[in-house]
Image: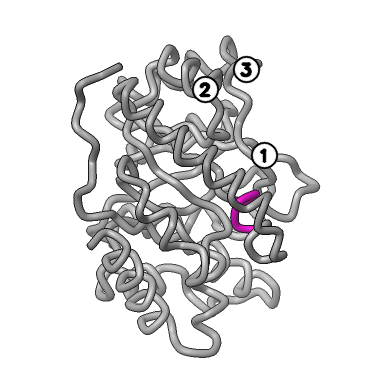
Amino acid sequence: MSDTPRYLGRLRLGVNIDHVATIRNARGGDHPDPLRAARIAADAGADGITAHLREDRRHISDDDIDRLVDEIDLPLNLEMAATEEMLTIALRHKPHAVCLVPEKREERTTEGGLDVAAQHNHLAPYVRTLSNNGSRVSLFIEANPVQISVAKALGAAVVEFHTGAYADAAHAGDLELRDKEFARLTEGGRIAHEAGLEVHYGHGLTFDTVKPVARIPEAVELNIGHFLIGEAIFTGLESALLRMRELMDEARV
């Protein structure tokens, strides 16, 4: 076992603004503006902005990425599939971080973690090239020891664990499955941290489910988007962000 101390520092909040763009694109035009959401997030205490540039451009656009890079001071975490088109874009913009994620054209949202064990040979040159270009590479994976081991071997700096199954079970009231998934997330954090990887979590987290994940000692960052954008309809984006930040801080105390 590693003697690396568990993290337990201030937990970073990355805010995913994709679904501001989803609403904009439903009607066309320029409103609501994802860049405005990024500015509000920055003012409300977000530590970074996450944006997923998909192959089909269903929400975030190339112009959104251009503007985020040029006009926002917070670190940009660019989520993308491991394709040559996306690699070219990432190499040009040099975002602070690049998170490689699975992507299927027919899915409504990311359905699970990237199978880095099965795709090792495909992913290796992407991780290497992006890292050499100055971006911290994160792999969005399930909290599985094999996937963690391969992520380390690939040279990624960060793993982000998919919290969707935990969040879905909690929402459905399936406490047995919720606890099983949470135990998997907790153990994954320990294994990844001991391997020298920075540990992030994301997908499906809400006010009701964030605190247990925020208490995981190895967690360094949570990436949250869809829930915050949805909550903003009722309370405003700043209010939603401040509440999420408050819950995360309470969990760490």
Say what amino acid the circle numbered 3 marks: Gln
Q: Nearer the viewer, residue 228 or 49?
A: 228
Q: Which residue is mark 3?
A: 119
Q: Nearer the viewer, residue 34 or 183?
A: 183
Query: SS of the residue at dot 3?
Result: loop
Tell me the residue at 58%/10% (across/down).
121
Asked whether residue 65 is in view, the answer is: yes
**Disc 3 to disc 1, C-alpha distance:** 13 Å
Confirm or deny contact between disc 2 and disc 1 (CB under 8 A): no
**Disc 2 to disc 3, C-alpha distance:** 16 Å
Marking on residue 103: 1
Say what amino acid the circle numbered 2 marks: Pro
Q: Residue 49 at what x, y percent from top left?
A: 37, 57
Q: Residue 174 at what x, y percent from top left?
A: 71, 59
Residue 119 falls within the magenta-colored stretch: no
Q: Residue 193 sits in which quadrant?
A: top left
Tell me the residue at 43%/12% (across/down).
153
Region rendered in magenta: 164-168
